[in-house]
Amino acid sequence: LLKNASLIFTNANLTYRNNLRRLTFMGDSLSTIIFDNSKIDFEGVSFRGFGNCLHASVKNRELTGAITFANSYVHLKNIEFSGNQLGDDLVNFYRCKVNIQNSIVRDAKADGIDFDFTTGSIVDSKVFKCGNDGLDLGGSSLIIKRVSVSSCGDKGISIGEASRNVSIDSVLFYDNEIGVSLKDESLFSINNVNFLKNKVDFVAYAKKAQYGHSKLQGTNMKFTNVSYLIEPGVIMPKGVVVTRTPNVIDFMYGKKYGRQSVR
């Protein structure tokens, strides 16, 4: 149990694979754990608690996560991240190459996982009970496959800041404020998704002035069966016809949708 401290691994090669005896890291609200410039291969590990009151940083970048992987190669299987007490993100991947399999992210105070300038995948996993976004992508390229995202107070998945080659396949969005949010010159495809009991299923719009509109590269989603808000300028696949809503941002960030964005 880590109390009122930062635990930092740097330039490390760490491996733990044991599903019979689970390794558990626990921390309080004044603690954070950081893996920097490392190679991580974990299977059968739990991270519980932690916060981010110490304003820890790596290379002059202030870290927002209770648990942070930075500038690292990360393979995670059968991992549980749960119950951060403070911090913008339960988990933050910053400039990483990451593969996550058969894992759970739950009970996040704000965002579940924040992927910043990161490439890789998350498959066969569950993300639920996040105060804000379940998965938040900025400048990242990610495969998201056979994942369920539920009970998130803002977006199930938020894709922005010119994220590229994001693929969502066989994903369930259940009971979120917003299922999928696409913005700011991001490119992605979405196939074989189910939307159930979200306040709104899909939104696409421009948020930040330095970016243009996004592009949905491919989909088999029937927009007649989902609730959506899509701005003029968002590029849709050939043959997909949708009704456009000007100034979608006027409905976002607590104005009508995304109530947890106002903190």
Image: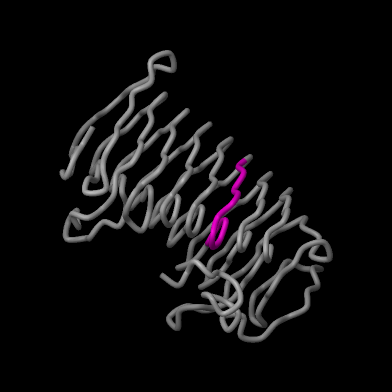
Quadrant assignment, res 155:
bottom right
Screen quadrant of the N terminus: top left
Question: Foreground: 181 or 251?
Answer: 251
Q: Is residue 29 above or below residue 199?
A: above
Question: What residue is drawn where x is 26% and y is 48%?
Answer: 29
Question: What residue is drawn where x is 62% and y is 51%?
Answer: 168
In this rendering, would 93 be left or right of 37? Answer: right
Secondary structure mostly taken by the magenta-highlighted segment of the chain: strand
Q: Position of residue 18 (x, y in %)?
A: 39, 17
In this rendering, would 236 be left or right of 125? Answer: right
Question: What residue is drawn where x is 67% and y is 47%?
Answer: 172
Is residue 50 part of the magenta span, yes or no? no
Quadrant assignment, res 47:
top left
Screen quadrant of the C terminus: bottom left
Question: Foreground: 116 or 194?
Answer: 194
Residue 135 visible to an observer of this rendering: yes
Q: Position of residue 137 (x, y in %)?
A: 47, 58
Name the outermost residue toward the bottom: 246
In this rendering, would 200 be left or right of 16? Answer: right
Q: Position of residue 185 (x, y in %)?
A: 52, 71
Question: What residue is drawn where x is 57% and y is 56%?
Answer: 156
Residues in magenta? 147-158
Is residue 152 part of the magenta span, yes or no? yes
Name the outermost residue toward the top: 20
Residue 57 visible to an observer of this rendering: no
Q: Position of residue 90 (x, y in %)?
A: 38, 49
